[in-house]
Image (cartoon, grey):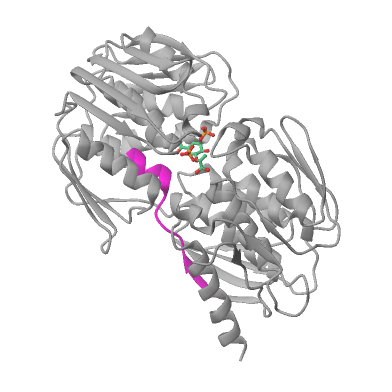
Amino acid sequence: MQDPYPVTPFTTPVRGSVTVPGSKSITNRALIIAALADGETLLQNCLFSEDTEIMVNALQDLGFDVQPDPAAKTIRVVGLSGQIPNKQAELFVGNSGTSARFLTAFLCLSKGGDYTLDGVPQMRKRPIADLAETLNQLGANIETTDGFAPLRIRSNGLAGGRASIDASSSSQFVSALVMAAPYASKGIEIVMEDTSVRRSYIDMTLAMLKQFGVPKSALAASEEGYSIKHHTPYQAKPDGYLVEGDASAASYFFALPVAVTGELEIHGVTKESLQGDIAFAGRMEEAGAYVVWNETSATVHYEPGAQPESLEGSFYPYSDTFLTAAAVAPLFNGTTTIEEIGHTRHQECDRIAAMADGLQLLGQEVKETEGSLSITPRPLQPGTVATYHDHRVAMSFGILGCYDALGNGQPWLQVEDPTCCKKTFPDFFQVLEKLRQDSINSAQ
Ligand SMILES: O=C(O)C1=C[C@@H](OP(=O)(O)O)[C@@H](O)[C@H](O)C1
Ligand SMILES: C=C(OP(=O)(O)O)C(=O)O
């Protein structure tokens, strides 16, 4: 792939259909849950990308029988009823937040284990200390390196009990605890120290516990915290567990018609998704898109000639999609202000700074505060945007590049390091280019 990658703009309204890959969040949760369950589970419509490969490799390094079949999009996992076979392993989690946080709690269940967990340099800057501290309150023995990875985890089963957590920097801390909880000797009661947390991800985790057989009566959730009873093991799913399409990945396709007008069918998404990021569709409706929901797809329509309305307010509950909104904000009719996204400064990169840099380079008036970003549209100027190894920065600017800013169909926006989207959507730019060609063909 060319690097930097020149995005070829659409010269016709988008017309066609796209199928989003399986959800990263659900694939990586299902892998952890299936490994803890009692026997064989067949995961279907899995995401095959860097983040899920990291989780698969980690489970294999721990001695689990995990067999991915990329062509069939399935992964077969043999769960060992809460046992972890290998007692020593050095796990590499790259820059996968879900793998790092979920595995940290999972490893604490091992009887007599001694593990290290480390990632790329950026992972060594991402928050994990609060999770380690809470697990230590629950009987674990985790040493961080000055509050960060690499971690050393010496485990002898997790006692469980009641503990508090500050999950304001990452909801994944709570999801990690919740998924390990059924195998902690006393179950786990989590008291939220700070009630600001992305609840939709924890709700997704709780919903998946139920899907894998944890009785509703064993789970309690409130503003103040969560509790999960002990001895509520997961039931394996040999006949299959279907992973939903990725709602965060779908955000790019909900935004595309807003950028280039037209009509696009997005397959693999449902309005009743377990993923909170599906709410991004509503934000595009606010901008003027028309969305029709079908059973397993959505059709997004945007009228040629209309100018998208600017957006305002919090993107806190679905912050992975703020980058998508920021990237199309130069096409809106006024200033877009995206609030409550401060935690995203500690994700794959400093996401507010990355989007601000790229948008400024393309001629936009941008203001950032610690927790917000506002974009006032100005005439777009050609440029090459840096992506800071962040898949969402690359994919978001990919959508803006589809807009024909020069009015001649020539690329004006180049994306540096486009293959960084392999973290969650390896063939994103190929899918986008195919949509452009399908749109030309259907216009003829
Ligand atoms: O639990 C999950 O699957 C995720 C939770 C969110 O993380 P934070 O709560 O750390 O923001 C999100 O950004 C990430 O992409 C996936
Ligand atoms: C923040 C993200 O990922 P993670 O935390 O799983 O690395 C993301 O995919 O946008």
Image coordinates of residue 30 in percent, x first then y, are 31, 41
Image coordinates of residue 22 in percent, x first then y, are 39, 54
Q: Left of 321 or right of it: where is 131?
A: left
Residue drawn at the location 77% of the way across and 32% of the way down: 369
Image coordinates of residue 114 in percent, x first then y, are 23, 19
Closer to the camera in the image, 406 or 41: 406
- Give the total of numbered labels: 0
Residue drawn at the location 43% of the way across and 58% of the way down: 426
Q: Left of 370 or right of it: where is 151?
A: left
Q: Left of 174 or right of it: where is 315?
A: right
Please determine whether, in this image, residue 323 is positioned above or below residue 82.
below
Residue drawn at the location 58% of the way across and 31% of the way down: 346
Residue 217: tell me if it is visible: no
Please say whether residue 154 is one of the residues in the magenta stretch: no
Residue ranking furthest to the bottom: 444
Residue drawn at the location 80% of the way across and 62% of the way down: 380
Q: Which residues are magenta?
A: 16-29
- The part of the image, by quadrant, that contains residue 94 is top left
Q: Left of 137 or right of it: where is 338?
A: right
Please determine whether, in this image, residue 3 is positioned above or below residue 150.
below
- The part of the image, by quadrant, that contains residue 348 is top right
Residue 31: tell me if it is visible: yes
Image coordinates of residue 171 in percent, x first then y, are 50, 29
Please say whether residue 22 is one of the residues in the magenta stretch: yes
Q: Quadrant of the C terminus?
A: bottom right
Closer to the camera in the image, 155 or 148: 148
